[in-house]
Image (cartoon, helix red, strand yellow):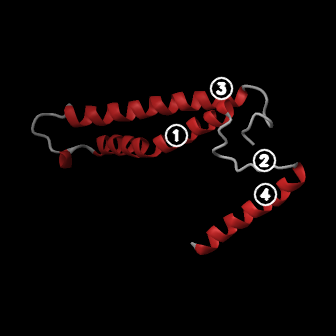
């Protein structure tokens, strides 16, 4: 449903760009916090002696830095889908309308087969 045929306005594009900008800023903030905690500790203080609050602040950026790049990549792919018609997220049959129903059923069947094999 992210194709231009279903949403002809630019609202989804701006939404994806806003989320992408927020994701990049959050990753930058996470890296900044990690580097700050590692580099600006009191001389002689090991990581084991850090206060619990600082550990919490250190763990959250690690989670952010490892999780958000995948989400940002999916937003970039969605923008490429909409702007360049790359169709990475949607499996579209390039056949008449009557065949698209059959194609959708085949796609759902392959998804069911994949879930059964797991």
Query: Residues at badges 3 and 1 in contact (C-beta under 8 Å)?
Result: no
**Viewer-side label of 2, 1:** 2
Which numbered dot is residue 14?
3
**Viewer-side label of 3, 1:** 1
Which numbered disc, 2 or 1, marks the residue that appears first in the sequence? 1
Residue position marked by numbered label 4 in the rendering = 104
Q: Which residue does the image show at 72% across and 25% down from the upper left?
A: 10
Residue 19 relative to residue 46: left or right: right
Q: Is residue 99 above or below residue 68?
A: below
Camera-nearest residue between 99 and 114: 99
Question: Does dot 1 land on a helix, a strand or a loop?
Answer: helix
Cα–Cα span, label 3 and label 4:
29 Å
Q: Quadrant of residue 88?
A: top right
Cα–Cα span, label 3 and label 1:
16 Å
Which numbered disc, 3 or 1, marks the residue that appears first in the sequence? 3
**Picture coordinates of residue 40, whole percent (x, y):** 20, 31
Camera-nearest residue between 97 and 1: 97
Cα–Cα span, label 2 and label 1:
26 Å
Q: Quadrant of the N terminus?
A: top right
**Picture coordinates of residue 77, whole percent (x, y):** 58, 39
Cα–Cα span, label 3 and label 2:
28 Å
**Picture coordinates of residue 11, whole percent (x, y):** 72, 27
Which numbered dot is residue 17?
none
Residue 116 relative to residue 93: left or right: left
Which numbered disc, 4 or 2, marks the residue that appears first in the sequence? 2
Q: Is residue 114 above or below residue 14?
A: below
Which numbered dot is residue 73?
1
Which numbered disc, 4 or 1, marks the residue that appears first in the sequence? 1
**Viewer-side label of 4, 2:** 2
Which numbered disc, 3 or 4, marks the residue that appears first in the sequence? 3
């Amino acid at each position: 449903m992210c194709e231009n045929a279903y949403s002809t306005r630019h609202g989804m594009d701006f939404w994806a760009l806003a989320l992408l900008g927020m994701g990049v800023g959050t990753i930058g903030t996470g890296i900044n916090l990690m580097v700050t905690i590692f580099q600006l500790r009191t001389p002689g203080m090991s990581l084991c002696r850090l206060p619990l609050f600082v550990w919490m602040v250190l763990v959250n950026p690690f989670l952010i830095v490892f999780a958000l790049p995948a989400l940002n990549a999916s937003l970039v792919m969605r923008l490429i889908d909409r702007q360049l018609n790359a169709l990475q997220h949607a499996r579209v049959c390039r056949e008449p309308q009557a065949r698209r129903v059959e194609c959708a059923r085949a796609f759902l069947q392959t998804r069911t087969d994949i879930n059964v094999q797991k």
